[in-house]
Image (cartoon, rainbow, N blue to C red):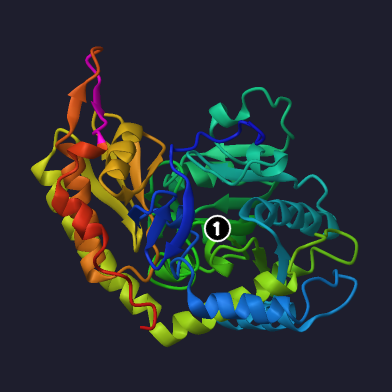
């Protein structure tokens, strides 16, 4: 073993991707409905993304943030125009974007002479990353174990509880950070009323409102920014994952009110906003416009929700009703069944999905997924349930042998290659 043992990887080696499919080292194709964990919005090996990467790599790969360069300037203008924010900070990941937002909130209060205002308030069930600051804002003790002491100045309030939020946002709170759709805890949507209350309370109490859209942003909910679905505009929004369709980039967007919190030397990132990922992100934004991707997401979302709801109603002993928004969907797995076993069984049937908190399975397919591929995904998930076994402890497992996968499922794998031209 040459890689540190930090990931529990599936027994699968991916060598290539095409549209909404991944291909392993044996040539077997899988319908990818986890999309690199909500990263590959335009699918795999999109020719326009590849062309943008190659062209930029032949021109300029890195110059550092000691100088201006065109790709980051263009991308910042695009994001500001599309979000109605004022300024952008580029980094390399969602965790780093959230770290930047935490630092901005504290420095913003400091510059206003409110040095006691340093608490970052987050929600129960939150996930904001794994570096120390973002981890301290993540409400999951399992992620904290062995890393104490975590940084201080963080507090939590129940998700979707406006009354508790009113009590929690006090004079020491610099910012309230919230995911409009919580992905890692099982795909749970904030209510519009909760986020609207957050906006009013932050305005009234003098705190910043930060939306973590690392997973739910970039069109996944049916609009470029998730906040558009809720009628609430935050002071700061963080992006990453799908922004460059697989290349490492994160972004923190701040409105005019918040942007003044940072000055030269307050924060930085050696590779943040490097030319190649910025070029990929610009291509992504152009392609999503050409495809009218938001309309496509809404159509496929309605189809996937309907198909999964029908499947859940036909197998209520295994699945709960689907929840989520757009093409970020979770389903609770009923005890004694296990989400990890369902993910494994689906993989054996040729479908890649993910697990999430609360014993749930998660769908986050490429946003270009076709009507046929959505139907195939629901069919393959249902097929995986027919392999239920008792592991001897009373807990149900779903672990089919590949020979148990019906031949029609295998032949379906070669059908429905995704049309990425729109």
At a point 22% along the width and 47% down the height, the residue shown is 381
At a point 50% along the width and 68% down the height, the residue shown is 218
207 on left or right of 118: left
On the image, which quarter does residue 29 sit in? bottom left
Where residue 267 sits: x, y (%)? Answer: 83, 58
Element marked by disc 1: loop
Crowding at mark 1 (Cα within 10 Å: few <14, some 14-19, many 20+): many
At a point 89% along the width and 66% down the height, the residue shown is 264
- In the image, is residue 186 above or below residue 289? above
- In the image, is residue 257 above or below residue 354? below
Mark count: 1
Q: Which residues are magenta?
A: 394-401
On the image, which quarter does residue 229 sit in? bottom left
- In the image, is residue 31 above or below residue 285? above
Q: Does any portion of residue 255 appear in the rendered image? A: no
Q: Residue furthest top?
A: 393
Q: Nearer the viewer, residue 292 or 189?
A: 292
Q: Residue furthest left?
A: 314
Where residue 374 sits: x, y (%)? Answer: 24, 62
**Does residue 248 show up magenta in the picture?**
no
**Does residue 398 show up magenta in the picture?**
yes
Q: Nearer the viewer, residue 136 or 249?
A: 249
Q: Nearer the viewer, residue 414 or 209?
A: 414
Q: Quadrant of the N terminus?
A: top right
247 on left or right of 182: right
Magenta stretch secondary structure, dominant: loop
Query: Circle 1 sits on which residue?
Result: 214
Q: Quadrant of the C terminus?
A: bottom left
Where residue 134 sits: x, y (%)? Answer: 66, 44
């Amino acid at each position: 073993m040459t890689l540190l043992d930090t990931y529990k990887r599936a027994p699968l080696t991916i060598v290539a991707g095409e549209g909404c499919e991944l291909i392993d080292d044996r040539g077997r194709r899988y319908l990818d409905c986890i999309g690199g964990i909500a990263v590959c919005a335009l699918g795999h090996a999109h020719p326009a993304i590849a062309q943008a990467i190659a062209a930029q790599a032949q021109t300029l790969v890195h110059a550092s943030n000691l100088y201006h360069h065109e790709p980051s300037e263009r991308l910042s203008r695009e994001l500001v125009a599309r979000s109605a924010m004022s300024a952008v900070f580029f980094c390399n990941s969602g965790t780093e974007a959230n770290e930047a937002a935490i630092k901005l909130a504290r420095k913003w209060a400091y510059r206003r002479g409110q040095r006691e205002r340093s608490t970052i308030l987050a929600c129960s069930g939150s996930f904001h990353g794994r570096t120390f600051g973002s981890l301290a804002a993540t409400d999951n003790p399992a992620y904290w174990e062995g890393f104490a002491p975590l940084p201080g100045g963080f507090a939590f309030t129940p998700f979707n509880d406006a009354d508790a939020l009113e009590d929690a946002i006090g004079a020491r709170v610099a910012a309230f950070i919230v995911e409009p759709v919580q992905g890692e805890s099982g795909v749970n949507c904030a209510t519009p009323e909760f986020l609207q209350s957050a906006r009013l309370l932050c305005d009234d109490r003098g705190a910043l409102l930060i939306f973590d859209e690392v997973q739910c942003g970039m069109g996944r909910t049916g609009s470029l920014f998730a906040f558009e679905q809720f009628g609430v505009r935050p002071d700061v929004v963080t992006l990453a994952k799908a922004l460059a369709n697989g290349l490492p980039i994160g972004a923190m967007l701040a409105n005019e009110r918040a942007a003044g919190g940072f000055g030269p030397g307050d924060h930085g990132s050696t590779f943040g906003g490097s030319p190649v990922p910025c070029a990929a992100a610009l291509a992504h934004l152009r392609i999503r416009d050409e495809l009218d991707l938001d309309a496509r997401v809404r159509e496929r979302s309605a189809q996937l929700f309907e198909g999964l709801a029908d499947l859940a109603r036909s197998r209520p002993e295994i699945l709960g009703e689907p929840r989520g928004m757009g093409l970020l969907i979770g389903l609770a797995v009923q005890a004694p069944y296990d989400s990890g076993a369902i993910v494994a069984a689906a993989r054996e049937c040729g479908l890649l999905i993910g697990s999430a908190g609360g014993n749930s399975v998660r769908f986050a397919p490429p946003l270009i997924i076709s009507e046929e591929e959505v139907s195939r995904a629901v069919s393959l998930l249902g097929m995986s349930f027919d392999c239920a076994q008792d592991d001897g402890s009373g807990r149900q497992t779903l672990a089919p042998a590949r020979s148990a996968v019906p031949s029609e499922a295998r032949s379906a794998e070669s059908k429905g290659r995704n049309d990425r031209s729109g």
